Amino acid sequence: MVNALTTNAPSGGIEFHNVLIPDQKDFEVKLKPLYTGICGTDRGEVNGSLSFAYNQPGYNFLVLGHEAVCQVIDATENEYGIKTGDYVVPVVRRPGNCVNCRIGREDNCSDGKKNEAGITGLHGFMRDYFFDSPGNLVKVNDRSMVREAVLTEPAKNVMKAFEVFDTISKRSIYQNEDSTFAGKNCLIIGSGSEAFIYTMMAHEYMFNVYMTNRHTLGESKLSILEKTGSIFFDYTDNVPLKGIDLLIDTSGDPATIFKFVRMMNNNGVTILFGTNGKAPGTQVNGEDIDYIIERNICMVGSVDGAKKHYFDALRYLEKWGHSQNSVINKLITGTYSPENTEIFLTKPEGEIKSIIKW
Ligand SMILES: [Zn+2]
């Protein structure tokens, strides 16, 4: 029996209670979650709006949580070098049998028969302890970054999205003559933790980086964003940039996305990342389609990331964490106890990333 935060997917609800979890299987290691992150997916499950979530087969509940950093409390020797005492991030997706799942790219699953811990058919990480195969764990080498490593899961999505961007960018000469993206514009829609991590990665590509939202940012978020060297604008007010080369949406709001697609430069790339099944529709007309075609604009969806993107994410988090003006620790805006289930129902003012300390 363990204490766990559970929901009943997809109808919703939240409970912190004692539950019976699966026994340890051969070769599995025992893990103690230290921190778990809360995101829109968890809140969608709790409020019953995430229709694709479902319970682990054989259970009438689902343990929540897909963003975690854990300590290994009991490991036998394994080929992955995971040892007792190590800090690790467990991967979310677990492969099915399709061709992409079989080559370690369950992030690109072809038939949808993968599982996601805490989301689709597999218990998540919000519990006192659990067992997992060492092959599902990514080691956190820098022990000064254990708390910030809870951002690895959201950051791995960003790593995957930039891999998608790199792939699309090969279709034409898109960079500057000096091979960089310096002077080109990247606009990120939204102001959550993913949006902040996207801004940091866009700076790695030397883009001019802008963030926008329907509402202005609070002072603390604004000062964090400024430290990253990015510019914020409230798009209902003024739009300070003329053309966009890379547009990244974390809002899932069609009206906002298409407002900015109409500002894309030739060969521009739009990455759709944010999901929002409840957002109202928008009218796309023939002129919009002509605009996209005539400029070779590519719109692409990107979800999840492969295990290699977790390693990339940790490398960048470590780099950013040790750089001057680092804002990585400031992205965690609140730490809560598992008993405080209210945090799943109401988003705290100024939240970037709320985490639970176990
Ligand atoms: Zn698959």
Image (cartoon, rainbow, N blue to C red):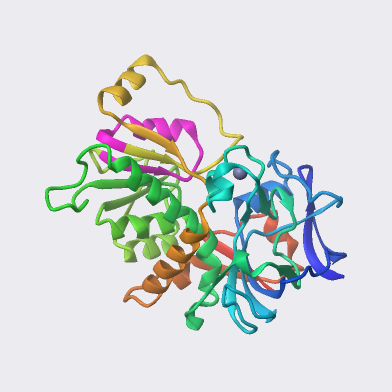
Does 134 lie within the magenta span? Answer: no
Q: Residue at x 54, y 77 (%)?
A: 146
The answer to whether residue 301 is above or below residue 192 is: above
Q: Residue at x 65, y 47 (%)?
A: 96
Residue 154 visible in the current orientation: yes
| Residue that sits furthest to the top in the current view | 286
- Give residue 350's position: percent from left, percent from top: 52, 60
Does 258 lie within the magenta span? Answer: yes
Out of 76 and 107, give the one closest to the viewer: 76
Query: Which quadrant contains ligand 1?
Result: top right
Q: Is residue 150 left or right of residue 19?
A: left
Write the start and end of the magenta stretch as one range.
244-268
Query: Residue 229 sits in which quadrant?
Result: bottom left
Out of 76 and 305, give the one closest to the viewer: 76
Residue 355 visible in the current orientation: no
Q: Is residue 179 left or right of residue 171?
A: left
Q: Is residue 236 left or right of residue 86?
A: left
